[in-house]
Image (cartoon, rainbow, N blue to C red):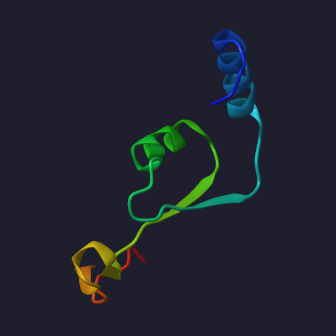
Amino acid sequence: MYDMEQDIMDEAYQQIKKIEVDYRLVVQVLQGSHIFNQLPLLEKYDMDVEVCVPVYLRERNVWKNGIVETKGSLKAEPLL
């Protein structure tokens, strides 16, 4: 992704983890995102975090003559 030496990247990540923060990081992860599997890395940081992921998806499939496909439910219970 970046053209940096791995040891420099590791040191930067260690320094970032030490920063005292007073904010909330909100991450919205959409269907099919490549960062979904990276979300556990957020547990290493000491900040408020909220991750938003889809509970419902409705889209037209252009490969199937525009058939509408749905996944999930709008009746999903929130964590709150």
Residue placed most toward the observer, 13 or 63: 63
Q: Is residue 21 left or right of residue 43?
A: right
In the picture, which quadrant includes the N terminus?
top right
- Identify the image quadrant of residue 13: top right
Residue under the point 75% across and 25% down: 15
Q: Position of residue 56 (x, y in %)?
A: 33, 80
- Identify the image quadrant of residue 64: bottom left
- Residue 72 at least partly seen: no
- Residue 33 at least partly seen: yes
Q: Position of residue 26 (x, y in %)?
A: 61, 62
Residue under the point 50% across and 42% down: 43
Identify whether 42 is placed above or below 4: below
In the picture, which quadrant includes the C terminus?
bottom left
Residue placed most toward the observer, 66 or 57: 66
Q: How many marks?
A: 0
Residue under the point 69% across and 20% down: 9
Identify whether 54 is placed above or below 42: below
Q: Position of residue 58 (x, y in %)?
A: 33, 84
Residue under the point 39% across and 64% down: 31
- Identify the image quadrant of residue 27: bottom right
Q: Position of residue 62 (x, y in %)?
A: 32, 77
Residue placed most toward the observer, 3 or 45: 3
Identify whether 50 is placed above or below 74: above
